[in-house]
Amino acid sequence: MNRTQQRGWALIALIAAFVSLGAWALSSPIGSSPDDDYHNASIWCGQGFREGLCEEGGEEGAVVVATTLIANSACFAFHPELSGACPQSSEPIETFRSNADGGYPPIFYWTMSWLASDNLDASIIAMRLVNAALAIALLAATLAVLPREQRQAPLFAVVATAMPLGIFVLASVNPSSWTYVSLVTFFASFVAFLREESSTQRWKLVSLSAVSMLMGAGTRADAGVYIVLAIALAWILVFARKRVTWQNVGASAIFAGLSYLFYRGAGQAGYWGAGSEGSGVSSLGEFAANLVNLPMLWVGVFGTSGLGWLDTEMPSSVWVVGLGLFTAILFMSVSKLTRSHGVALLGAFGAVVAVPMYMLTINDTAVGASVQPRYIMPLMALVVAVALYRFIPQSGVQLSRVQLGLIGVGLAVANLVALHTNTLRYVSGNEVRSVNLDENIDWWWASVPVSPSGVWLIGSVAFAVMTVALWKLREPLGLVESRLTPA
């Protein structure tokens, strides 16, 4: 495949990915992702008080926004039998659930606030599409700058953990969308930066690292912790005396320092302190119960805990594909590990255990009560990225064309089922059993001219086209042993 053909297939993959995420963006109404009442108010108030968008409430910490932004979630959350057909109102309502107290770092809300308007539907759709585009652009830019042998890790880190929770979050207005993709791109670009000798490439890589760090640590407090973890894992992977330069050490210190400042500046960091959720520290028995039930959080990433407000149950055909791919990739990756690689992988997996266990223990809560799968989803992706990282083309996981094809088919089918399930839940309620989404329409976007079935089919076909494009790009993406001249 020549360069022109590569660019053509890459463009097809990018467009198809955006169309697919666009279908997910339209598959659910305002307020459908977890804590959307909080996030919506925080976005509309992301630039402070603005007439007609966000106004000061009557009490300290209260803000006034459009009723639909707050009330829509309560209309259908935890009631999957109900559709998304809720009374729409732009009348002002006062709420204390917003980022007025600085609970979250401000960058995500400030960025999204530029799209806020009095046309609530148009604003939410635009925000979801922009989030989808940002995720695709950041991952694509990272893949383009990385050496060919290092592209497999970040790509599979997303592919192996995105179905279905990751895709749902990426096409939402939930800050976890930025945390998820930015941790993968930060780790990938920062490891490459530490090893790279070309000054031009180093500038590209450190710039991508900086953007990823800001998108992550500037969005959620826990992302600041994850960025520091990624820095430590990167150094474990590449450590050698010649890597200890003032540029590498300085960049590490700056990224870690900024991440810490974002973390400390967010009230959300208090969740990592004792007693913020429960009545104190868990007992030994409660700790043991959480430890043996911890895998419930891991598999929740693949849909076992449901989407939305954890109330949209996914068919087993969805989560079996995602969990199977994740397990298979990790199993194959451990056959070729150096000592440093093994230590880094152990550290990444240790974080997937230690981080949720710490939060559960210090806040005296049980698995499934407050710590959600989306909180650890970035760490799950980081585990895959560390497991698949390689520095020479001959190392790492080598997949055949048939294996890659089976992965693509499996993911395309899982996406088709998941998108249909999520759309049906809001269009008609999950008590309706129908392949035709247009048969019992109770809710749909008034401004979208395409029907629910049309959006579902377009999104499903686009996802399948994306997998075909990635299969065609398997050599330049480092998914198989390359016959190309090293890039």
Image: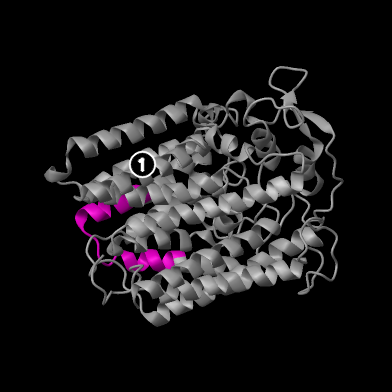
Q: Position of residue 316 (x, y in %)?
A: 62, 68
Tell me what residue is drawn at x 56 percent, y 74 percent: 464
250 within the magenta span = no
Towards the viewer: 343 or 181:
181
Residue at image mark 1: 229
Quarter of the image holding residue 383?
Answer: bottom left
For the residue carrying disc 1, how many other residues have a C-alpha within 10 Å: few (<14), some (14-19), or many (20+)? Answer: some
Tell me what residue is drawn at x 33 percent, y 59 percent: 387
Q: Is residue 473 left or right of residue 315?
A: left
In the image, is residue 485 above or below residue 334? Answer: below
**Most distant residue in the front direction:** 4
The answer to whether residue 15 is seen in the rendering is yes
What residue span does the magenta drawing correspond to? Answer: 326-348
Q: Position of residue 29 (x, y in %)?
A: 74, 52
Q: Is residue 398 left or right of residue 68?
A: left
Q: Is residue 94 left or right of residue 255?
A: right
Towards the viewer: 160 or 128:
128
